[in-house]
Image (tube, rainbow, N blue to C red):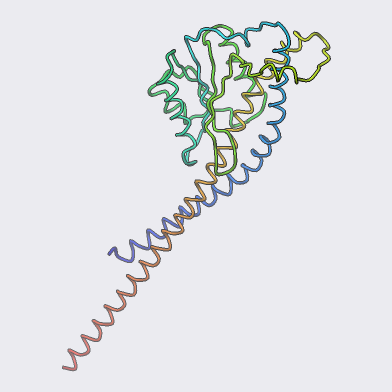
Amino acid sequence: MPNLKEIRNRISSVSSTMQITSAMKMVSAAKLKKAQDAITAMRPYSDKLTQMLVDLSSSVDFENVYLKPRKVKNKLVVCITSNRGLCGAFNSNIIKKCNEIAELSEEKVSFFCIGKKGGDILSKSHNVVDSNNEIFDELTFENVSLVGEFLMNKFLEKDYDKIEIVYNKFKNAATQIVTTEQYLPIENNSNKEEEQDSADYIFEPSQIEIISELIPKSLKTQLYKSVRDSYASEHGARMTAMHKATDNATELRDQLKLTYNKARQAAITNEILEIVGGAEALNG
């Protein structure tokens, strides 16, 4: 059994760890509320914008480079992770999915990483063409739009024939869903029945001009939604992980205190026995 000083040191260490994990949990809980409100408010707008684009594109004989599929030789995967760890399996699930895509794809796969954790690991075994780790320092639509423009230019220049986004979709604080979405070319998932039921739009200016303006905006919004989803998922995962870590630290501290009290009681009992034994020897 370890001596009393060692146990006291361990109790002190575990208590300090518990204070840190508890503080991190509260910080993530505060950030999660704001991030959750942002993504919840944004989803209806993003979904409606995408649906409107699909309706307009399917109802007119219109060719656009962003809508036209082509033979895939080079594929770019946008990997969205976090800059920091201590958030459970949040980052490892995304990296695992990216590795699966690279292994199962017949075409050449490259990666664009948003978040430091993904870039650090994927760069060891895959081709990471670029990364952006500063985007979470000031997460705004304008900053994400710059990344969206970069991706669109790469597709226009035919550096890549297909672009996908891999990210954690926020469901709740305890659940994040690993999601893969096709970014470019834009998928037309509508069918004839949906086309018949689609809204009757009045166009001003022309329908083609509206679609041409709507496509870049829709792509930027889709990317922004994905980054927002990942950001909310990160804080949910970290809050859950720190909550479990705090509970484990509390349990370990209680066990150490029990061990300490038992060791202290045994030491006191031994001292009493030594005193009694010494007194009996003197009397004898």
- The residue nearer to you, when weighing 202 against 174, is 202
| Left or right relative to 55: residue 9 | left
Residue 178 appears left or right of 126 = right
Identify the residue at image location x=60%, y=28%. Answer: 226
Q: Is residue 32 above or below residue 194?
A: below
Quadrant of the snapshot with the C terminus: bottom left
Left or right, 228 with respect to 74, comes to right
Query: Residue drawn 51% across and 25% down?
Result: 79
- For this view, does 3 lie left or right of residue 238? left
Taking 225 as reference, is 147 above or below it? above
Query: Image quadrant for the N terminus?
Result: bottom left
The image quarter in which residue 175 lies: top right
Q: Which image quadrant is residue 96 in? A: top left
Task: Please provide percent x and percent y for residue 37.
Answer: 68, 39
Q: Is residue 243 above or below residue 104?
A: below
In the rendered image, residue 100, in percent from the top left (x then y), is placed at 42, 25
The residue nearer to you, when weighing 145 against 276, is 145
Residue at the (30%, 74%) spot, across then down: 266
Q: Farthest front residue?
A: 193
- Of the pair 144 and 47, the residue shown nearer to us: 47
Query: At which x and y percent is residue 34?
Result: 66, 40
**Residue at far left of view:** 284
The spot of residue 188 in percent (x, y) is 63, 16
Please report the residue visible at 68 percent of the width from the left and 36 percent of the height from the top.
40
Number of marks in picture: 0
